[in-house]
Amino acid sequence: MMRRRKRKRKLPLFGLTLLLVVVMGVTLLLTGWTVLGEETGLETVAVTGTAILPQESVAENAPGENVSTGKYAELLSSPEQMAAQNMIPFAPQKTDEISLVFAGDILFDDNYSIMVKMKGRAGGGSLVEAGFDAAILQEMRGADIFMVNNEFTYTTRGTPTEGKAFTFRARPEHAALLSEMGADIVSLANNHVYDYGEISLLDTLDTLTAAGMPYVGAGRNLTEAVRPVYFVTENVKIAFLSATQIERMENPDTKGATETSPGVFRCRNVDLLLSEVEKAKAVSDFVVVYVHWGTESTTELDWAQKEQAPLIAQAGADLIIGDHPHVLQGIEWIGDTPVIYSVGNFLFNSKTQDTCLVEVTLDAQTGALKSFRFIPAIQKDCRTSLLDGAEKARVISHMQSLSSGVTIDAEGYVIKTS
């Protein structure tokens, strides 16, 4: 938390004169005592105490300086309390707004095309710069908070889930790429974070913790898996939650967390998610729910998305970000809550696919939603880039066709119309 330096006030002329008189008087008195002591053999007298200066000489805070008066100033002053409640302090780059940016699935597994291409392209240089163009990196790194879906494990252990078509694991050192690309928090609520068994999830949690990367949507037990991460400024507290409904079966490959075992936050039954959203809303100014749902490779919403989105909004979500379908899906407002049903792949495979960033801005004093912007991008040849010109217009037009009750302007700003 940034603090202003104290400003010392200058002594007035009267104060300076009085101080000089006091100092000269004390000097003469001590000199007299010293001479008297030498002449009479008296013992030396030690004078101790606190000098009393004119009141105006004491350094004071100028009005409003170095005094935290924000809504969460007291909370921010207690690192122990912040840590205990899974809260992270941050300072927005602008004084009047907070920027949140979201993207979809990423993959850092060395055995798949993304990392193979990135390494070849990097030639010993930055893997991140080999995977993203400069324009999109500027958006990612420039956000106050940037969130992505970490759709794989970090481990060298475990065995791949039997019968699963695709299983992903990355070397633990690749977790450093998250910070380099600008990520501030990741979602683990997906169907690949358990691909090499329980040990692979536990290694992932340990790796992210060691890397200083906050995560939501999975944990060593249910309490940890459902727990939000809060980002806090002096005036605004933002809650992030994440859950998955994918692998809709009684015994899924990706295990749900229990009171005594690790796993993901499952929301096939949405009741627990709704309860956690309500609790987060009660102590926050803005609540983000990042949910893994939908049907792969289709722009059509499925029954569970249609059923759960209104319930999540009613529970207190101020923003719903969806992923899993690997393609873009539409945007709508449910009451005052914007929903994008799928942000698509972000840097995940070798396909050429439209993708995006979603940028949301909040009022820095109240946490109220100011704007929602869809930023078109493309994943092509294992590299993700921003779009402009005709291609940007094409993707915006496509998203407009998928979206109801909103208008998306030429710069991607989404306006509620009904």
Image (spheres, helix red, strand yellow):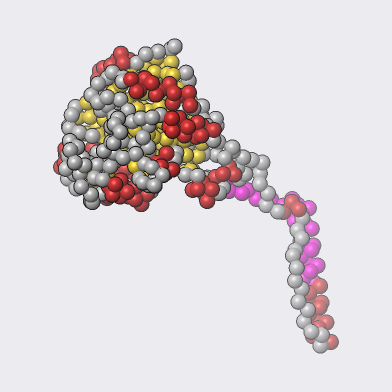
* Residue plotted at (51% across, 34% down): 279
Tell me residue 6's x, y (percent). Answer: 61, 49
Determine the residue located farthest toward the bottom in the rendered image: 41
Lateral position of residue 382 relative to residue 33, left or right: left
- Assess whether residue 26 is covered by the magenta stretch: yes
* Residue plotted at (24% across, 45% down): 196
Position of residue 54 relative to residue 118, above or below, is: below
Instruction: Point out the stretch of residues depicted in magenta.
Output: 4-28
The image quadrant where one finds the C terminus is top left
Position of residue 281 relative to residue 110, above or below, is: above
Tell me residue 46's x, y (percent). Answer: 76, 76
Lateral position of residue 148 relative to residue 39, left or right: left
Determine the residue located farthest toward the front in the rendered image: 250
Res 324 quadrant in image: top left
Question: Which residue is at the front of the view, 46 or 306?
Answer: 306
Question: Which residue is at the front of the view, 74 or 98?
Answer: 74
Res 407 quadrant in image: top left
Question: Which residue is at the front of the view, 295 or 398?
Answer: 295
Lateral position of residue 49 relative to residue 107, left or right: right
Provide the major secondary structure of the magenta segment.
helix
Can I make out residue 133 in this image? no
Question: Which residue is at the front of the view, 212 or 276?
Answer: 276
Tell me residue 243's x, y (percent). Answer: 37, 34
Tell me residue 101's x, y (percent). Answer: 38, 32
Determine the residue located farthest toward the top in the rendered image: 418
* Residue plotted at (39% across, 18% down): 332
